[in-house]
């Protein structure tokens, strides 16, 4: 295989995974990030290796529910109304997918990206100091009542069709499994084969440090564009200079669209802004990551703290965090975990990179040779990052991946 000089733009989980797999193939790799590894979404996510998260947000019925949700501050969907005109070219096709047929299609496309996530993280981190952050575990969906689970039958049926099995727990069984939920929720579903990252930011930084230790170049700088000749890339423009390369990979999360546009390629990409609050030194922790379905947030035990993460706010890349999503998470905390105490609370907002069809963009850019895409992983980028990196390394080496990549084809936005 021909060894190449490759620049990977963006050092979130997707970029770091890609850089590592390319390095393992023997390439000379530079990992470039405007702020350093794990600066953005990969820092503050819920830390869940979400092997069953192949149902898109755009389930059937969203269209009918969305207006009411947007007007209700107790629902986990927010919109910065001033951003609506800019959002429409993404929002219209996004909502068009909110039907049964497209949900099935999208789920089938996402399964190969998420189902073996734990194995992919174990393979990526094996032999590195990052391995200690990967914790195999179950995942629990916690419901106020069994009827709330039954209302989600459409989604659970899709999971069943994809071979998933689970354990249903009534209140005593849940309390026996996890005393954290002893009072309150009446029903839960326990699914095996998941994992959690005990500190997502530290994990990605440890992977980046390993990459550097193995001879990779980690560079701080903002990619401003590309140098091309006769439709082929030969450099990335950073701070007015050209860094030479044979190939470049765009893994800049929600900012990837801006970078692609400098090449005349316009993927339809938006930021689904998400929020977390962290309780440091909590008086109790759940045993495993738990989706509190009534509040649509995930509670994940992390090193020294409990992280509660969720909420979708549509509002673009530039505005700062809004107060209402934090207030909602705090109300949900009080409602669902009334006895919990903690020493300190911190809060964070980040940008999920999302396409209207909820499928990532992975593969060669259609209009320029030598530039590859690895972005658009919406709610499952931590889960699917290592697999994406492995697939990109295979593609760049000219090997044929054992996965149908058609659903992720960058040409669907050409
Ligand atoms: C609240 C919340 C909870 C979530 N929970 C989960 C979860 O439990 N499980 C899961 O799988 N996913 C989860 N996600 C989604 C996941 O975090 C993202 O899909 C994932 O982190 C995206 O990774 P990325 O590498 O594509 O982008 P990012 O992590 O955003 O990284 C992009 C990087 O590119 C850099 N960059 C941008 N522009 C440039 C430029 N021009 N030049 C150089 N560098 C640039 C940035 O500095 C940044 O470091 C969650 C997201 C949120 C917000």
Image: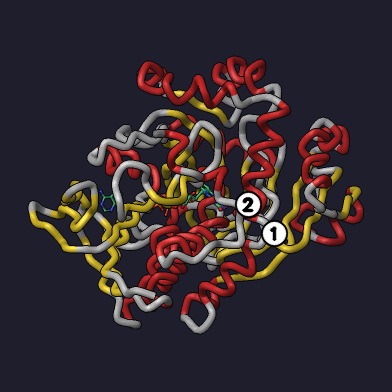
Assign a secondary structure to mark 2.
Answer: strand
Residue at the spot x=15%, y=54% of the render? 238
- First along the sequence among labels 2 and 1: 1
Answer left or right for 173 relative to 239.
right
Q: Is residue 180 above or below residue 304?
A: above
Provide residue 104's location: percent of width, then percent of height: 71, 36
Residue 263: x %, y % from top left: 25, 41
Inter-mark Cα distance, 2 to 1: 8 Å
Q: Residue at x 72, y 56 (%)?
A: 139
Q: Is residue 173 left or right of residue 58?
A: right
Residue annotated with mark 1: 286
Classify mark 1: helix, strand or loop.
Answer: loop
The residue where tag 2 is placed is 299
Q: Indicate the quadrant containing the N terminus: top left, top right, bottom left or bottom right.
A: bottom left
Residue 28: % across, % down: 29, 74
Residue 337, label in figure: none
Name the foreground residue: 371 vs 377. 371
Q: Is residue 225 or residue 323 the one in the foreground?
A: 225
Q: Residue at x 51, y 43 (%)?
A: 378
* Residue 34 figure quarter: bottom left
C-beta proximity under 8 Å, tags 2 and 1: yes
């Amino acid at each position: 295989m021909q060894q190449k000089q490759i620049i990977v733009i963006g050092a979130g989980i997707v970029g770091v995974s890609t850089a590592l797999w390319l390095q393992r193939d023997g390439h000379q790799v530079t990992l470039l990030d405007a702020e350093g590894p794990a600066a953005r979404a990969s820092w503050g996510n819920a830390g869940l290796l979400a092997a069953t998260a192949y149902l898109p947000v755009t389930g059937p019925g969203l269209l009918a529910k969305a207006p009411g949700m947007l007007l209700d501050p107790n629902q986990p969907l927010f919109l910065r109304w001033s951003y609506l005109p800019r959002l429409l070219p993404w929002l219209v096709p996004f909502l068009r997918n909110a039907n049964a047929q497209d949900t099935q299609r999208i789920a089938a496309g996402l399964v190969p990206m998420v189902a073996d996530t734990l194995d992919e993280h174990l393979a990526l981190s094996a032999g590195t100091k990052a391995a200690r952050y990967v914790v195999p575990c179950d995942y629990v969906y916690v419901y106020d009542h069994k009827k709330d689970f039954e209302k989600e039958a459409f989604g659970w049926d899709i999971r069943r069709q994809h071979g998933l099995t689970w354990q249903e727990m009534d209140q005593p069984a849940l309390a026996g499994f996890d005393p954290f939920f002893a009072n309150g929720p009446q029903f839960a579903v326990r699914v095996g084969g998941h994992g959690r990252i005990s500190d997502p930011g530290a994990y990605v930084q440890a992977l980046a440090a390993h990459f550097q230790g193995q001879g990779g170049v980690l560079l701080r700088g903002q990619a401003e564009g590309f140098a091309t000749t006769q439709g082929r890339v030969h450099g990335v423009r950073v701070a007015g200079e050209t860094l030479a390369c044979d190939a470049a990979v765009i893994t800049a999360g929600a900012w990837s669209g801006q970078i692609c546009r400098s090449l005349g390629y316009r993927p339809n990409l938006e930021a689904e802004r998400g929020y977390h609050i962290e309780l440091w030194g909590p008086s109790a922790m759940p045993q495993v990551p738990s989706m509190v379905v009534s509040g649509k947030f995930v509670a994940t035990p992390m090193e020294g703290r409990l992280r509660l993460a969720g909420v979708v706010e549509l509002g673009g890349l530039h505005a700062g965090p809004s107060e209402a999503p934090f207030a909602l998470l705090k109300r949900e905390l009080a409602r669902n975990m009334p006895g919990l105490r903690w020493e300190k609370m911190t809060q964070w907002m980040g940008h999920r990179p999302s396409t209207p069809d909820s499928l990532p963009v992975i593969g060669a850019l259609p209009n320029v040779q030598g530039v590859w895409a690895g972005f658009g992983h919406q709610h499952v980028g931590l889960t699917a990052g290592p697999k994406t990196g492995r697939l990109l390394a295979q593609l760049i080496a000219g090997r044929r991946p054992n996965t149908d990549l058609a659903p992720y084809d960058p040409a669907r936005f050409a």
